[in-house]
Image (cartoon, rainbow, N blue to C red):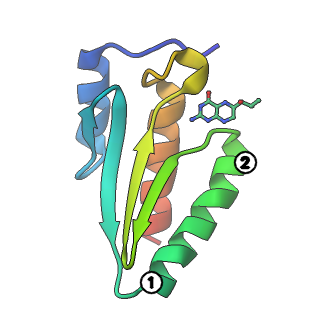
Amino acid sequence: MAQPLTSEEIEKAIQDLPEWEYGNDKISKEYSFDNFRDAISFLVRISYEAEDQVHHPEIMNVYNTVNISLSTHDAGGKVTEKDVKLAKSIESLYNN
Ligand SMILES: C[C@H](O)[C@H](O)[C@H]1CNC2=NC(N)=NC(=O)C2=N1
């Protein structure tokens, strides 16, 4: 089972994750798009990656913005390597 990361490990991990923040036992980022369609298309792409990784984000969408928050339920809602891995995958989706 994934072990919770220490705050120091999390802060180090998000150094490689531009604009990701750590707080309230989650890592999170807000993404903006030109329109609602592009925002939802991004969410659809995330859904496939999340299913592949069997690890799922918390998602908030308002118009052309998408807020992604990651924590691991199976680790008491703390941040684990699974969250860091999915965050890196989401960054790749956003940049490609
Ligand atoms: C049974 C299933 O694999 C587990 O419930 C998975 C599903 N997706 C998950 N997503 C997240 N964020 N945390 C989990 O612990 C988790 N566990």
In the depicted structure, whether residue 32 falls above or below residue 29: below
Q: Name the residue located 46 percent from the left edge and 76 percent from the top edge.
A: 39
Q: Name the residue located 53 percent from the left edge and 27 percent from the top edge.
A: 72
Q: How many marks?
A: 2
Residue type at mark 1?
A: Phe
Quarter of image, res 82: top right
Residue type at mark 2?
A: Asp
Secondary structure of the residue carrying numbered label 1: helix
- Whole-percent x and y of residue 69? 41, 44
Crowding at dot 2, Cα within 10 Å, few <14 / some 14-19 / many 20+, comes out as few
Quarter of image, res 54: top right
In the depicted structure, whether residue 5 falls above or below residue 95: above
- Name the foreground residue: 56 vs 94: 56
In the depicted structure, whether residue 3 falls above or below residue 41: above
Label 2 sits on residue: 52
- Name the foreground residue: 78 vs 18: 78
Q: Earlier in the sequence, mark 1 or mark 2?
A: 1
Secondary structure of the residue carrying numbered label 2: helix
In the depicted structure, whether residue 19 falls above or below residue 63: above
Nearer the viewer's eye, disc 1 or disc 2?
Answer: 1
Left of 57 or right of it: where is 25? left
Q: Name the residue located 62 percent from the left edge and 68 percent from the top edge.
A: 44
Q: Name the residue located 42 percent from the left edge and 52 percent from the top edge.
A: 68
Left of 27 or right of it: where is 84? right
Q: Quadrant of ligand 1?
A: top right
Crowding at dot 1, Cα within 10 Å, few <14 / some 14-19 / many 20+, comes out as some
Label 1 sits on residue: 36
- Whole-percent x and y of residue 20? 27, 46
Q: Is mark 2 within 8 Å of ligand 1?
A: no
Left of 94 or right of it: where is 41? right
